[in-house]
Image (cartoon, rainbow, N blue to C red):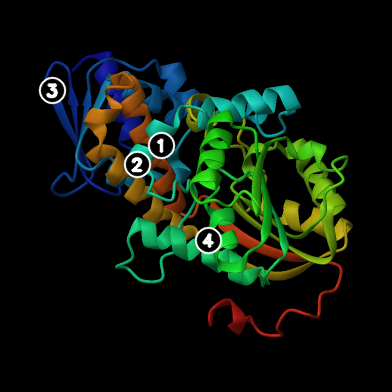
């Protein structure tokens, strides 16, 4: 067995909680752990030792999307097995530390946002459900479909916000607009959605016209930094999956702009990925998928809210719901793999499936959470005293 093979065996043998087989390009094999192997890792080309030690997941992720590593077994289960042993993984703190407090200018943020969300509506429509909702669903039962879970999530949010007919709602990072469409249909609210994605802006406008909701809804290509000078005001504000994109230096600016357009006693709901401490996004995901993403700690957002007299009304953790959502997306993606291949090359396809499986495993192992945080601007005694109203509608 050569030096390179010995290096991999020595390095990977530390991850021995679950048995698996390593196979090298010379067909030499080695079994890690005790028992029948649950999966197989085929190493077709070497990974540099320095890259492997510097950042394990970045090095392995790059090797996988290039086809230098093949997995025989369920990709999610394999990643989940390794992440369950995260304390054994190497990373160079100096290498990733700069990502934790990255500045995020308006121009830089817009470019990073568009690089992910402007891939194309046709691409996202292949594996999202028909609501085109690209965020965690809410599964009331194990039998819920992805569509059911996304409808549940939207109405769960609207119910938490205690929406009344005719209210004004701002959706920060509105995506393809389904939340505001549902709010307009059910409550006849007046809604404004803002996004930095031209593809989302185009699709949301089409949906508004298709449903003849022009008198109730509008979508703007607009950055949240412009809210303070906009002259707008709202009874309710919702932000689903946006805080992760604004950068750690901008959290207070984000809250300040919300404060400037939310009416006294108004309610705001944040739905966002969070962490226990101030960590960076996984280096592989940051490099290849969500270039500007930074995950806020829960305490960071709570601390800033208190500076603006925002009172915490309710907190809910949806971590397990996101695992199910991501696995549904992965299933849809693989079911439409032939269509995706007409748009993108094999490296992109491998990259995207690895992204969906990695995120599902990250949530499954509690490395990150996802929270819904309901706050009020000042004291609001108009909402019910108990949480029953959130579930009885």
**Which badge, 4 or 1, comes first in the chain's sequence?**
1
Q: Mark 2 sits on what residue? A: 127
CA distance separating discs 4 and 2: 19 Å
**Viewport quadrant of the N terminus:** top left
Q: Mark 4 sits on what residue? A: 154
CA distance separating discs 3 and 4: 52 Å
**Which badge, 3 or 4, comes first in the chain's sequence?**
3
CA distance separating discs 3 and 2: 38 Å
Q: Disc 3 vs disc 2: which is toward the camera?
A: 2
Name the element at disc 1.
helix
Q: Position of residue 25 (x, y in %)?
A: 17, 17
**Which badge, 3 or 1, comes first in the chain's sequence?**
3
Numbered circles on residues, count: 4
In the picture, residue 106 is in which quadrant? top right
Q: Residue at horizontal 66%, vertical 62%?
A: 189
Q: Position of residue 380 (x, y in %)?
A: 81, 75
Location of residue 78 with respect to 238 vertically, above or below: above
The disc at residue 124 is 1
Q: Which residue is nearer to you in this view: 277 or 259?
A: 259
Name the element at disc 4.
helix
Q: Position of residue 145 (x, y in %)?
A: 32, 60
User: Is mark 1 in CB contact (under 8 Å) with mark 2?
Assistant: yes
């Amino acid at each position: 067995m050569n030096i390179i093979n010995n290096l991999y065996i020595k390095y990977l043998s530390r991850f021995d909680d679950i048995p698996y087989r390593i196979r090298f390009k010379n067909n030499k094999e080695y079994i890690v752990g005790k028992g029948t192997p649950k999966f197989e890792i085929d190493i077709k080309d070497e990974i540099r030792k320095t890259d492997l030690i510097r950042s394990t997941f970045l090095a392995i992720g790059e090797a996988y999307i290039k086809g230098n590593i093949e997995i025989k077994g369920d990709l999610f289960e394999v990643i989940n097995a390794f992440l369950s042993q995260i304390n054994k993984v190497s990373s160079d703190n100096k290498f990733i530390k700069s990502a934790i407090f990255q500045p995020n200018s308006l121009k830089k943020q817009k470019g990073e946002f568009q690089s992910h969300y402007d891939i194309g509506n046709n691409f996202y429509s292949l594996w999202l459900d028909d609501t085109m909702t690209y965020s965690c669903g809410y599964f009331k039962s194990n039998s819920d479909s992805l569509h059911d879970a996304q409808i549940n999530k939207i109405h769960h949010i609207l119910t938490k916000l205690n929406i009344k007919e005719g209210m004004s709602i701002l959706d920060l990072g509105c995506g393809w607009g389904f939340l505001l469409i549902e709010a307009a249909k059910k409550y006849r609210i007046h809604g404004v959605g803002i996004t930095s994605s031209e593809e989302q802006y185009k699709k949301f406008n089409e949906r508004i016209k298709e449903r003849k909701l022009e008198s109730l809804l509008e979508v703007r290509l607009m950055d949240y930094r412009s809210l303070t000078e906009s002259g707008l005001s709202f009874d309710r504000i919702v932000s689903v999956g946006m805080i992760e994109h604004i950068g750690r230096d901008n959290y207070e600016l984000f809250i300040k702009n919300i404060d400037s357009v939310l009416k006294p006693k108004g309610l705001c709901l944040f739905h966002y990925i969070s962490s226990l401490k101030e960590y960076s996004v996984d280096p592989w995901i940051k490099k290849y998928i969500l270039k500007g993403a930074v995950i806020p700690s829960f305490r960071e957002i709570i601390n800033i809210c208190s500076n603006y007299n925002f009172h915490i009304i309710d907190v809910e953790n949806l971590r397990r719901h996101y695992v199910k959502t991501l696995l549904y997306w992965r299933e849809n993606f693989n079911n439409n793999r032939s269509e995706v291949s007409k748009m993108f090359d094999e490296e992109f396809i491998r990259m995207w499936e690895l992204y969906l499986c990695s995120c599902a495993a990250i949530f499954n192992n509690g490395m990150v959470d996802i929270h819904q945080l309901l706050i009020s601007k000042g004291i609001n005694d108009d909402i019910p005293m108990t949480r029953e109203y959130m579930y009885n509608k």
